[in-house]
Image (spheres, grey):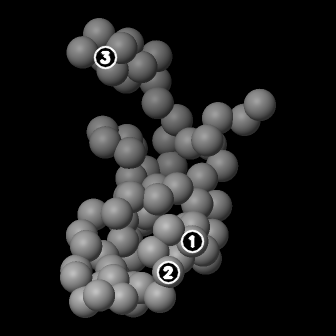
Amino acid sequence: MVPRSATTTKYAFRIRTRDGLVVDHLMIHGRDVADAERKLTQMYRHCEVLECRPQAPAGAKAGAAPSFEDVIALVSK
């Protein structure tokens, strides 16, 4: 089994619900933006997507796998 983080990206959405309420910081995993948006619209039918940003994992270096020391630092917190 492949870990979720290896095949998906977390996306931060800002939406307006069908009732007009603005919801910030909805975090959804997806293989790409379209997949994450599909999952979002399953939960929030008829919403309007105001913003979508891919999120890098906290403390992650772009494009680099975490080192052994990074993993130990996370576990020891």
Answer above or below: position of 48 versus 24. below
Q: Measuring 33% from the left and 83% from the top, which residue is drawn there? A: 17
Tell me the amino acid under the disc marked 2: Arg
Tell me the amino acid under the disc marked 1: Gln
Residue 75 in sight in this render = yes
* Disc on res. 73: 3
Neighbour class for label 1 at 10 Å: few (<14), some, many (≥20)? few
Determine the image quadrant of residue 19: bottom left
* 7 left or right, relative to 69: right
Nearer the observer, disc 3 or disc 2?
2
Q: Measuring 24% from the left and 15% from the top, which residue is drawn there? A: 77
Q: Secondary structure at mark 3?
A: helix
Neighbour class for label 2 at 10 Å: few (<14), some, many (≥20)? few
Mark 2 → mark 1, Cα distance in angstroms = 6 Å
Q: Label 1 near label 2: C-beta < 8 Å?
A: yes
Determine the image quadrant of residue 14: bottom left
Residue 22 location, x and y as percent? 22, 80
Tell me the amino acid under the disc marked 3: Ala
Question: Which residue is disc 2 drawn over?
Answer: 45
Answer above or below: position of 72 versus 38. above
Question: Which residue is disc 1 drawn over?
Answer: 42
Residue 68 location, x and y as percent? 46, 16
Mark 3 → mark 2, Cα distance in angstroms = 40 Å
